Image (cartoon, helix red, strand yellow):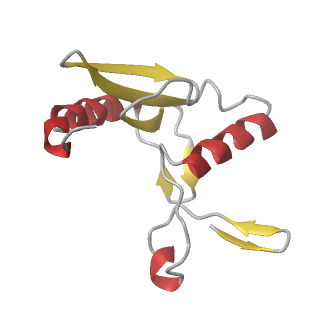
Amino acid sequence: MFADSNEVLVSFDPEVLEWYSSVVIPLPQHELFEYLLNELMEELGGITEDEVVRVAGRIQNEESQVWMESMAISEAQVATYATETGRRLTLDVSLPSEQSVVENVRRWLENAEDWGSD
């Protein structure tokens, strides 16, 4: 993200980091990403609310829990976003399908013991 007076440049392209090392790229579960997604949903009048879902997960009582919600409502150890409607972040970066994101979140949780204690 780049800000200059009243202008803000937001990029989801990792190559931008090669050009501007101080730029922040908002990723799922980053406060800025959550804020931008909520602003986009408001601006589009809720059009994306049914099209973009947050897939979240956590380990509780030694069991993995994975769920979907429309925005960051609950606390999770891991979370990312998915779509079934081909919604794109940029012209060349699209959100993955719900099925692939659920599989990723489950895989992340399976590897959670490698993270250490919370």
Q: Quadrant of residue 47?
A: top right
Residue at horizontal 32 percent and vertical 28 percent from the top: 102
* 10 vs 102: above or below: below
**Residue 86's x, y, as percent?**
52, 39
Q: Is residue 109 left or right of residue 58?
A: left
**Residue 84's x, y, as percent?**
48, 30
Front residue of this view, candidates 87 and 68: 68
Residue at horizontal 54 percent and vertical 56 percent from the top: 26
* 61 vs 118: above or below: above
Q: Is residue 98 left or right of residue 32?
A: left
**Residue 76's x, y, as percent?**
41, 30
Residue at horizontal 31 percent and vertical 34 percent from the top: 100
Q: Quadrant of the C terminus?
A: top left
Front residue of this view, candidates 74 and 117: 117
Is residue 36 something that shows in the picture?
A: yes
For this orientation, the residue located farthest to the right is 6
**Residue 59's x, y, as percent?**
26, 24
For this orientation, the residue located farthest to the front is 117
Residue at horizontal 35 percent and vertical 27 percent from the top: 57
